Image (tube, coloured by chain):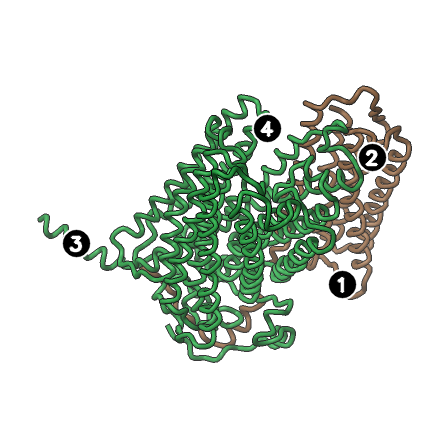
Amino acid sequence: MTITIPPKSNKESEGLQPKGFLRYFSFSLDHKVIGIQYLVCGFLFYLVGGALASAIRIELTSPISDFMPRDVYNQVLTLHGTIMIFLWIVPVVNGAFGNYLIPFYVGARDMAFPRLNAVAFWLIPPAGLMLISSYFINGAAQSGWTAYPPLSITTPAAGQIIWILSVLLLGGSSIFGGINFIATILKLRRPGLKLMQLPMYCWAMLGTSILVVLSTPVLAGTLILLSFDIVAHTGFFNPTLGGNVIVYQHLFWFYSHPAVYIMVLPAFGLVSEILPIHSRKPLFGYTTMVYSIMAIVFLGLIVWAHHMFTSGTPPWMRLFFTIATSFIAVPTGIKFFNWVATLWGGKISLNSAILFSCGFIVNFVLGGITGVALAQVPFDIHVHDTYFVVAHFHYIVYGGSVFVIFSSIYHWYPKFTGRMLNEKIGRIHFILTFVGFNLCFAPQHWLGMNGMPRRVAEYDPQFTFVNQLSSFGALLMALSTLPFLWNVIHSSFKGEIAGENPWQALTPEWLTSSPPPVENWLGEAPLVTDPYGYGKKQLQEQFNDLESEKQ
Amino acid sequence: MTTITPIDQSPKEQEVQHDLHADHRLFGLVAFLIADGMTFAGFFAAYLTFKAVNPLLPDAIYELELPLPTLNTILLLVSSATFHRAGQALNKSDSKSCQKWLLITASLGLAFLASQMVEYFTLPFGLTDNLYASTFYALTGFHGLHVTLGAFMILIVWWQSRQPGGRITSQNKFPLEAAELYWHFVDGIWVILFIILYLV
């Protein structure tokens, strides 16, 4: 489909918004600009969080605390967790790809509330800079990304308060984004487009946004109470003043367990977009995918206490949360088998995008299996707060979400910039990341099972070799960023011209120029009722051949 | 098979398309209020859990009196009704009556805040005295913040409706509707808060 008529300019919006490169530094209302802002901003914070991770791994190459002082180690691991979760994965899988793709998928010109959208983005850079600067002011927070009291009440207050403020800002940003996505998906659909015809990423974002709107405010309220404890010396979570630390844990995990789904559900959606296009087959089991997303949303809200099996949880609670958590394996398993079935028998072009997606499937199933293991009380009590949990968590959020982010960048980069990424460098990036990641985190399962505690700078000397192996993997991961950076920067100037639709995709973002015009399509928005209709004609022919053979 | 409708490329069509979609701001506000309600739900859950497992320390003072909060409840419930009257008046394009009811609503809200202040200053315990005292001030204070915000909103809507340009009319009533929805929400939260804090 080619459109030859030049775009009708909207004088008002063109007068207000800077053009060219500058618009990425402006309060732009264009959902595509905001999406790229989220992506690039998130990636810069990823580099900071990655540097902190490297510092942690360097410290852990030797069993004694020699690379940095212990309290600095605590600050580094707190900042690493907070930055990676709140400033990289959540903004990128939700904000970046959500803002860029959702209006296309629902056939809209922009999000439902463009100004709110820009506000949601512009809350992120100040919050992130505030968080990082706390290190230089008076020392950053030291109580980990969970900020459990009484630790968070007794460690230096300034860093903890700045941490709370920036997480509140980021939570606000996340809620505004969530409201915007719900309104856009439910209310802004092009006439004639039914809910069950939407691309899977819309469903994933709808589910995620429901989780964001229901659970993030609870974290905000909890952190406000925690800040009262720190600043005004109230005793909500301070046992010496009659308070209760377990209440904090319950409220915290009521947000932070769904937060795992906030990080990984959009990734599920993105993978469901990428796999069909590159294997030229319809997405297997669309309806079951939708129902399993909604089942994960529901179950995700009622499993939080499985993080608290060692917090004196009563037996009935352990039983309930073990069963509920194990149930999540069912919808997740359905999605896993659907992806494998999508690939099955497809005409797979083994490019960087699908390599990272397949890497995701492999890593995620490993992380999922350890997740089911951790849901079982006897096992969880054994490995609680050890490196086994660290390994499990990173298999979900790095092996899961971050692999999908890279896969999505390889897939949508031609749409973002109009140019292709270099395929060879992409494969080098994949191999380095995949090998590095597994070398870094697989040994940590063993470390955890053998009792190495997390969040401690020193460890028993018997773990030295395995830790060095893990650190070597981290080095490979750090190196893997270099070819990627060179690729995205070099290709944006010298890359092959992509054209409208280099992947021959059917989803609506590819039915316009690359990069798309301000209002997404020059004419009316296309109505795509079957975004996964790849190769259906051939399938029908094959089926007919089989039928005629039988006769 | 993929269905792609033919693309209408007439410039006239595009011009119309830009601004033409329904107003979803109220929908967005409802979603926001659900989020806001979850903040209160978290506070309520925390308070009820404290109540179930953390007994009041032996020498701690925590006593609440009923008359003033009951008056507060009546003030807020009446203000919800008066706000509703303001909306009805706007629907009939009776802007004088609408402004009157808005002003009455705002005064009731401010009266609530004043009465809450009186309660704060007469209570025998302070913010940091004990767990229950802290929870009491946190819950009522967070709600009071919402009432303050709501009262400001009503005054802004009242001021806007006095502007001659017709900023708030029966055609353009989103600011009033939004403030009204928010106000009803804040009143509803108060009723739950009143039951949980004072009656249970």
Label 1 Cα neighbours within 10 Å, binned few <14 / some 14-19 / many ≥20? few
Marks 1 and 2 close (CB-CB < 8 Å): no
**Circle 1 is placed at which residue position?**
B166
Residue nearest the viewer, comparing A36 with A143: A143
Marks 4, 2: nearer the viewer = 4
The tint of chain A in the picture is: green
**Circle 2 is placed at which residue position?**
B127
**Circle 4 is placed at which residue position?**
A311
> Label 1 marks which chain's residue?
B
Q: Mark 1 or 2 closer to N-term?
A: 2
Residue nearest the viewer, comparing B93 with B166: B166
Find residue A161 and report its horizontal and vertical position in percent: 72, 47
What residue appears at the point 71 percent right and 37 percent down from the top-left corner?
B189
Marks 4 and 3 close (CB-CB < 8 Å): no
Q: Mark 4 or 3 closer to N-term?
A: 4
Residue nearest the viewer, comparing B95 with A261: A261
Dot 1 and dot 2 within a common chain? yes
Separation of marks 1 and 4 at Cα, in angstroms: 60 Å
Separation of marks 3 and 2 at Cα, in angstroms: 77 Å
The tint of chain B in the picture is: brown
Residue nearest the viewer, comparing A473 with A46: A473
**Circle 3 is placed at which residue position?**
A544
Q: Quadrant of residue A366?
A: top left
Find residue A471 and report its horizontal and vertical position in percent: 48, 50
Q: Quadrant of the N terminus of chain A?
A: bottom left
The amino acid beneath tag 2 is Leu
